Image (cartoon, coloured by chain):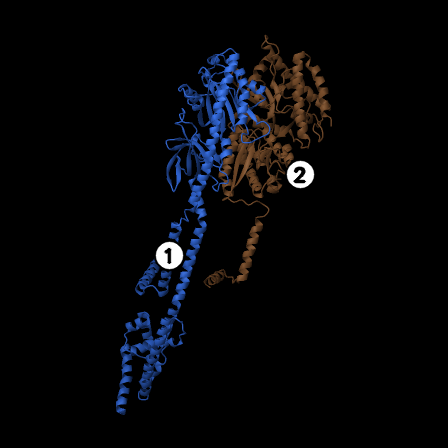
Amino acid sequence: MAKPVNSFRKVLTGMQLLGKLGPSLQRRSFVFFLFFLIAVMSGLLLILFSTGVFSVERNKFRIFLQNELGHAAQSVEQEYGVLSVEGVLLAERLSKQIEITLDTFGLNPADLKNNSQYLEPLLGQTVGLLRAALEKNKSSGVFLTLNATVNPSLITAESSRAGLFLKNMEPNVISITFPTIRLLKGPISIARQEDLDLLPQWQMEFSVQPGDFFFTTINGATESDLPLSRLYYWDPGCLMTGCYNKAMLLCAPLIASDGTIIGVCGFEVSAMLFKLQYTPANSPYTRAFTMLAPLVDNTLDASRALYAGHFAATHSGDDGFLSIKNPVAGIFSYVSPNGTIYSGLHHDINLYPKGSVFSGNQWALAVLIPNRDLAVKFIRQSRPIQILLLALFIFGVGAAALLSRRHVAPVVDALRKVKTGKVTHHKKTNIREIDDLMAFLATQDESDALESDALLVQAEEMAQISPLVQSFIENVKTLSPAERNVFELYLQGYTAKEIADKLCISINTIKTHNKRIYYKLNVSSRKELLLYVKMIQGENHKTADDAD
Amino acid sequence: MIFSECLHGLSKMMGVFLTKNKLIMMTLGIIVLLSLCGCGRGKLDPKNPVTITMWHNYGGQMQSAMDELVEEFNSSIGRQKGIIISITSISASKDIQEKLFMIAAGDPGAPAMPNLVTAYPKTALILSRQGLLAPLDDQFTEREIKDYLPQFIEEGRLPDGKLYVFPVAKSTEVLFLNRTLFDRFSTAAGITLDNLTTFEGIAQTAIRYHEWTDSLTPNVANDGKAFFTADSWLNIAHVGIAQLGGEFMTPDYLNIASTDFRRIWDATILPTLTGGYAIAGGYSSDLMKTGEIVCSIGSTAGILFYGDHITYPDNTTEAATFSILPYPVFAGGKRIAIQRGGGMCVARSSPENEYAAALFLKWLVQPKQNMHFVSSTGYLPVTKAAFEKSIEQEIASVENESIKELLKTVMQMYAEYTFLIPPNYDRLDELSKAYETRFKQAALEGRAFVLRENQEASVISEHLYRAFIGFGER
């Protein structure tokens, strides 16, 4: 316990001494250069910030978003617009076809529900139209859902609807052969008849429930007298019962000439198809993704979105609503309920014409990236500048240390020579002030040397008279150069403190010199020393007077 | 001057006084060494990841298992190394095969070859001949190869001896039985599961079943139902003849003129002509879903396609339980079953892409990932570690009862059966397709003739046989 305390005391004493003495010239010089370096670097940083060097990456990101979003939004509106038109046309054709077929059975459209035995042959007549529509359009599936079920007596009849759902397994591939079509929903007999393989998730009929694509479309048509082109509905990404892939559905009502709503038909845009079409290409941001989602109260519904890219919000468990925050530097932030932030841009997508029953349903296409990816990217991109600045700083500190040492070296050397009495050995530094001072000191030394030499001469003359003086003279010659300097200054009448200040040494050093001087000169004090000096000087005057 | 002083100071600190020239030579040497280290294998850069496109045939319920694995890889090792796996097509194996043939043939409109694709060796052979596949021997060390079951690795080697088809998940064929329908019939007709252990027994059972179902509707003639079908009639012939000690496939022809094949014929065509067997265009699981058959032979990988209920034409449904029984054996024959399941092939492309694709495959078949896939799909593990050490524990932990039962049956087969690896001859694909087509055609025409002309099925079978064996000429 004692040792650390002692060490601390030594440090404190040292610091106090340092405080009294002040920092050395070299240290002051180093600090000066350091301040200069900091000023230069601050200026450099200010220039970099004001010229937007650090915001280059942010600007690049915004431009990337704008480009991606612009192309994708235009494409989505066009593609989905075409599908909407084709869906309406398909609905018209199917409605007509169904009416004709029912007529051959002697039935009216309203009779369909109660004559389920005709459903299968009726569906069989529509396969041609459905296949043609699927082959013509870039969609992953085509469907027809009738407002009737094969077996109305079943408990599940209320939520079951007969129909057909044909899936195109490769909608993104143009093939000279027919597309690979599989039956997802529909009677097995039609699959056999049309030589269609079943999908593993095959079910005979559609499972429907209030609020889903079927009832929403039917209700929209029932509650309105608008033309068919204003009645189609885009159902957001959902999982159909028994399916494992999310998909958007374009749904158009089938309306007979007598106004009976026979069912719903339309096209499917699967998550896979959307991904293949809209994955950001050649993106410098690996986890950038495109998202087509319903826009609800300034939030994007991630749970019902389709994603394209190598990442999706749902991969982070963000399957809720992404709140859209105000943009900063032209880039929006999207915050998920669990706090994940995405940066990007979004664009309203117009899926409905004016006056549509569903025109209040808003959609948006967004190009997003997880915010932390962006931060990492920005840091990485600015790394070369960071490294350069760091290197500049390290170099600057080293240069400051080196320069301050070199700057101060001649001064320190000169002071050392003064202390050791080698003023006359000074080599020219070509620093005018130092060289002038050293020259001046050299002349002073000569005159000082003359004074003490004169004293020695006097003393030597006295030595012939007094053995004590002789001894004193001999002893003066044994003084070291440093001791001689101190002795000289005593002769000139300086006090010990004044000598310490003059020679830039500590008072303790003066005391040490004093001890040695007294010892060598065989005196016990300064007073006795000066007495000897006075004696020598006094005797000489007496001798000179006698000589006169 | 200051820089050189600093350099000098630095070198002094290192205790080595380096001249300027020595420093330059050292720097150049390091640069050359680093560039040499980059040769031979693709270099991956996490900052500029490569995208590896993948096609696979793990659809339906299996899709989510594969999706989870891909997502896990992309967010872990993929991110570290700079690899993104992107699934761009999920189709049935025959659809993928068709597209691959288009690519190999250079058909206009053919899609771009993906970096990774599931394929059978016979398809890989065609692709490799076009220089479209990368051999995987360079991507795996000998020690790594030894981790996998040798028969799986051997199946993936093509005639040039190189490994092109990497075993990701294997399968075999088993007998799927709708227990609900069978028990109903069994009670009435006195048929037991023992009748289903041989092909001859299944044939007789099928004829009985057809008669029994016909008898349930005395007012309707000839409405008896089929009992059995198979995904691959070719495999029955191939495996059946092996069970009887013969060889069905040769490089130039199928050995249908042998007496062994006659037994195959009698056990398959005859029940078809009587209506006991069904001939379907698609998978046997399709007929199982609608209750049109009671049992079928199919791949273990199809377990999830059978569902848990039957849907009848009037949209009524009936819950159904399924049993999975070992592959039947021809009476007096050896217990032999086929080894199935395609593997994954890596497309020839840049060294980086090939390396990245291989890295994904290695990760995919590590026991943890492999067992996760197996327990969700009904495929079989491919590593010795998973097969020999983990399988018992994994079976116990599987939640899906159908898969659990399937794995138990397969483990029993692995203990009792020998597995036949399909050969890989040049003409095999052509001969196989021709056999399936002609067999089905003969069966359907024969059945129609029997119904139309009210002829004895055995007589028609003889005529058809004589016509059929003419097809096997060189």
In this view, the residue farthest toward the top is B219
Q: In the displayed structure, would residue A481 be above or below residue B366?
A: below
Q: Which chain is blue?
A: A
Most foreground residue, A418 or A172: A172
- Nearer the camera: disc 2 or disc 1: 1
Q: Chain of mark 2?
A: B
What number is the disc on residue A38?
Answer: 1
* Residue B148: quarter of image: top right
Hue of chain B?
Answer: brown
Residue A347 appears in view = yes
Q: In the displayed structure, would residue B435 be above or below residue A536?
A: above
- Measured in 3D between alpha carbons, the distance from the residue under mark 2 to the one under mark 1, in whole angstroms, is 68 Å
Quadrant that contains the C terminus of chain B: top right
Q: Residues within 10 Å of mark 1 (few under 14, many from 20)?
A: some
Q: In the displayed structure, would residue A453 be above or below residue B71?
A: below
Most foreground residue, A176 or A292: A176
**Do marks 2 and 1 share a subunit?**
no
Number of numbered labels in the structure image: 2
Q: Residues within 10 Å of mark 2 (few under 14, many from 20)?
A: few
Query: What residue is disc 2 on?
Result: B161
Residue A409: x %, y % from top left: 39, 68
* Amino acid type, callout 1: Ile
* Residue A507: quarter of image: bottom left
Residue A291: x %, y % from top left: 45, 34
